[in-house]
Amino acid sequence: MNRRLFIKGMAACAAGFGFLKSVVALAVEWPKAVFDSETETDAVKAFFGDTPIAESADVEIKAPLQAENGAVVPIKVSTTLADAESIAITVEKNPVPFVTVVNLQPGSSGGFYSARIKMGETSLVRAYVKAGDKIHMASQEVKVTVGGCGG
Amino acid sequence: MAFVTKMKIKKAGDGHDILCLVKHPMETGRRKDTSTGEVVPAHWIEIMTFQLNGNTVAEAILGSGVSKDPLIGVHIMGAKSGDTITVNWKDSKGETGSAEATVK
């Protein structure tokens, strides 16, 4: 390998590294406190703060009534609220009740979020949608026959 | 270790549904290996970013409660034919992955 080739390679490496770094920098910090919370109430408070929560018909959860395999439970949350900023999914009785959340850009991403989640036992699944200065909530019970947490 | 990342774009209503599948173990750190009896160390995807032509449109924050081989879906608006959609993710061990697709 001659010197010119070596320098070229180094430059490509640096460029590649810079790209990786910018990708990481884009992402928000993973909110450890939220996922460390042992109760759903604490987790929701840790994520959304003291914003008032109200049950709402504008939020819809699509989930199976009964899940045969708790390791893979498909959940779909949709909302008609146009200014939805984030959609969170929680499972009340999981060891880590806060499952996932998506932050949206009102106008460029819409009120929809789907994920496959783990459920340890039969529990209420809740969806929280932050829109404006309010949190809209919906819930549905999912019966689990075989748990998804190593059971 | 590299994980396979796949993305699908589907026209839906007033925009497009984006589905992203990553072949990832999503270990909670609670599960025990049945053959050795040892706890499998935690390893899960923390953040998944969806970009339309380089602008972040949705950012999913995942916990260990998301299933193995996560399938994450979001809905985006305003994407035109020929636009690029990129998904990037980062896991709890600092590993990353991405996929890119063009809107038809």
Image (cartoon, rainbow, N blue to C red):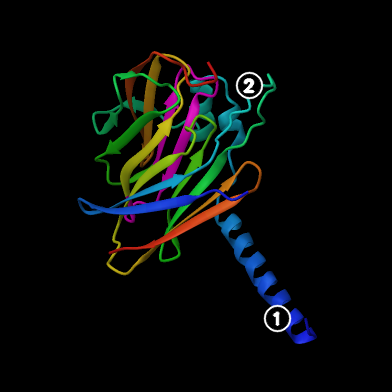
Give the quarter of the figure containing the C terminus of chain B: bottom left
| Residue at mark 2 to residue at mark 1: CA–CA distance | 47 Å
Q: Residues within 10 Å of mark 2 (few under 14, many from 20)?
A: some
**Which percent across, then down, holds residue A127?**
37, 30
Q: Nearer the viewer, residue B43 or A136?
A: B43
User: Which chain letter matches label 2?
Assistant: B
Was residue A94 drawn as part of the magenta stretch in this picture?
yes
Q: Residue at x 65, y 47 (%)?
A: B94
> In the picture shown, does residue A10 fall above or below A28?
below
Question: What's the magenta region?
Answer: A86-109
Q: Residue at x 45, y 65 (%)?
A: B54
Q: Single out the residue that lies furthest toward the front.
A: B35
Q: Nearer the viewer, residue B9 or A21?
A: B9
Q: Nearer the viewer, residue A24 or A111?
A: A24
Q: Single out the residue that lies furthest toward the left.
A: B13
Residue where numbered disc 2 is placed: B32
The tag on residue A8 is 1
Amino acid type, mark 2: Lys
Amino acid type, mark 1: Lys
Q: Residues within 10 Å of mark 1 (few under 14, many from 20)?
A: few
The tag on residue A123 is none
**Which percent across, then down, holds residue A119?**
45, 21
**Which percent across, then down, holds residue B63?**
53, 34
